Image (cartoon, helix red, strand yellow):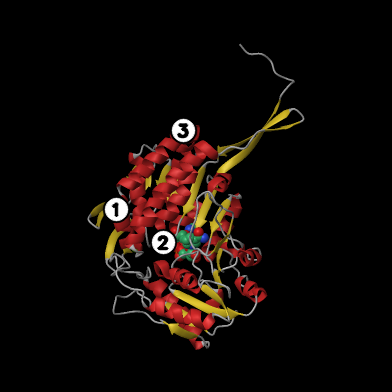
Amino acid sequence: MSHTATVAGIPVDTRHWIGGRRVASASGATFTDHSPIDGAALAEVSRGGAEEADAAVAAAKAAFPGWAATGPAERARILHAIADGVEKRLEELAQIETLDNGALLRSHRRGVMPRVAHNFRFFADWLTNELSHPDFDTNTRRNHVSWDPAGPCVLITPWNAPLMMESWKVAPALAAGNTVVLKPAEWSPLTASLLADIAHRAGLPAGVLNLVQGYGAEAGRPLVEHPDVRRISFTGSVPTARHIAAAAAANLTPTSLELGGKSPLLVLADADLALAVELAVEQYDNAGQVCLAGTRLLVHESVAAEFTRRFVERANALVQGDPRDPATDIGPTIHPRQLERVDGFVRRAIAAGGTAVIGGSPRHDLGDLYYRPTLLTGLPQDAEAVQEEIFGPVLTLQTFASDDEAVALANGTRFGLAATVVTGDRKHADLVTGRLVAGTVWVNCFYVRDLRAPFGGSRQSGAGREGGTWSFDFYCDIKNTVTAQEAGWTRHG
Ligand code: NAP
Ligand code: MG
């Protein structure tokens, strides 16, 4: 059987990458990866299990001492070489990612893939230029804080932004001097395979980056249960996070969890409505399959009618279709299960008394997986569609009469990933943002994310923060060395 798939005319090796070698599953099992654009089978991908998980962790463990002992400057040089490789293959990566997960080709070209390269450069530079803490003295003893490599890390990623999320974890983990086992999502496994090739060509030693493909429960569980793993970084859903946190508890493996959201977008009475509408429509990006999406529009009652009128006009002008077409604004959902899930939420919301002001059904004329951008109104705060992450192009709209009410609605879910506030008054913004529970709050903007900033979720949107020094705090064993300055030294040489 051939282990190479040709995707968008580009050869992709679909086996695992373990210890610097391509290996098929010991069982010989594979799974079929499909394109959400038209349902076409793209590749037969190796389906890993406990045997591959063990081999990958063993390879990461064996490679760890060498990589940890490689100086920061050399590690940074290799990370920059990986970024060069990503930039060189940017068009191929963008084409493959779009075929694999259905997000817009123009976003992959202009935004996502350049960001992937930047993730490697940023953490390389942070390691060499920024990662320090000033020494300080305690009674003539000098305290020196260092960030030491921790060991093999398991990195598990979702399908909605595959290479983006993978590089966001791989880059700081490698920069920190750790070795890695990456497990991509089964619905979007392909670009990770190219990343392994790129890292190999960039000179990353064998075993430093390992890739295990497969289903979460089969390939992911033995990885997170493994006693030789020193860190687990997971991005995905709350139910999976519970399994992972429970598995990690057995070994007390430190775990970083970046999970779902049900983020509010607040339009205050003094907001610039044109800006508010633009920001609201942006929430349909990637067919709403964005963890940070502000899916709950909370609008002051004095402007709600005008906001809704303008929003509907703007949303109706969005072009839905093939994500490779430059004119397209909204592509497909990723999988039949995802489309069914989205439609189920909408049907139940309507049955419960909600109204679909726009959308509310699939667009079968475009293919099997396209769902109309939808706006639901008339739902109370405890409605399922207001409380649960739908992860599709579905927004709800509720109104409020006061800041107190707006804040209560905004904070009134079990999530706390992000929040967006639109207002024309800086003081008003400060009053409201100070009361919001969220890892990231945007005011009059959305999605701007500087890698120096902390990123993560509050409540059930996650545990821990990554970004800048926070990433190194997670991926490293932080050590304080206290040295007596005056007494105790004997002379050498
Ligand atoms: P998911 O079902 O939780 O899967 C995420 C990853 O975990 C996949 O690689 C999955 O493998 C793996 N997995 C599943 N069960 C596992 C187990 N028992 N042990 C170990 N690994 C396991 O999430 P998803 O549907 O792919 O992604 C969508 C979710 O991710 C949404 O909730 C979204 O909000 C969240 N997300 C959060 C952020 C953030 O930064 N906060 C960013 C993006 C997405 P399989 O694919 O084989 O199941
Ligand atoms: Mg796919």
Q: Is residue 210 above or below residue 384?
A: above
Per the rendering, the mark at residue 15 is none
Q: Does the residue labelled 2 lie within 8 Å of ligand 1?
A: yes
Q: Which secondary structure lies at badge 1? A: helix
At label 3, which amino acid type do we have?
Ala
Does residue 420 appear in this view?
Answer: yes
Give the image quarter of residue 493.
top right
Q: In which quarter of the image is the N terminus?
A: bottom left
Instruction: Give whichever of 209, 259 is nearer the camera.
Output: 259
Which residue has dot 2 on it? 159
Q: Are marks 1 and 2 in contact (CB under 8 Å)?
A: no
At label 2, which amino acid type do we have?
Trp
Which residue has dot 1 on it? 91
Which residue has dot 3 on it? 73
Instruction: Give whichever of 123, 326 is nearer the camera.
Output: 326
Q: How many other residues sit within 10 Å of disc 2, few (<14), some (14-19) or many (≥20)?
A: many
- Direction from residue 378 to residue 91 in the image, left or right: left
Give me the C-alpha separation between circle 2 and circle 3: 33 Å
User: At 31% from the left edge and 65% from the top edge, which residue is drawn?
Assistant: 35
Does residue 176 appear in this view?
Answer: no
Closer to viewer: mark 2 or mark 3: 3
Q: Which secondary structure lies at badge 2? A: loop
Pointer 1 or 2: first along the chain? 1
The x and y percentages for residue 23 are 33, 47
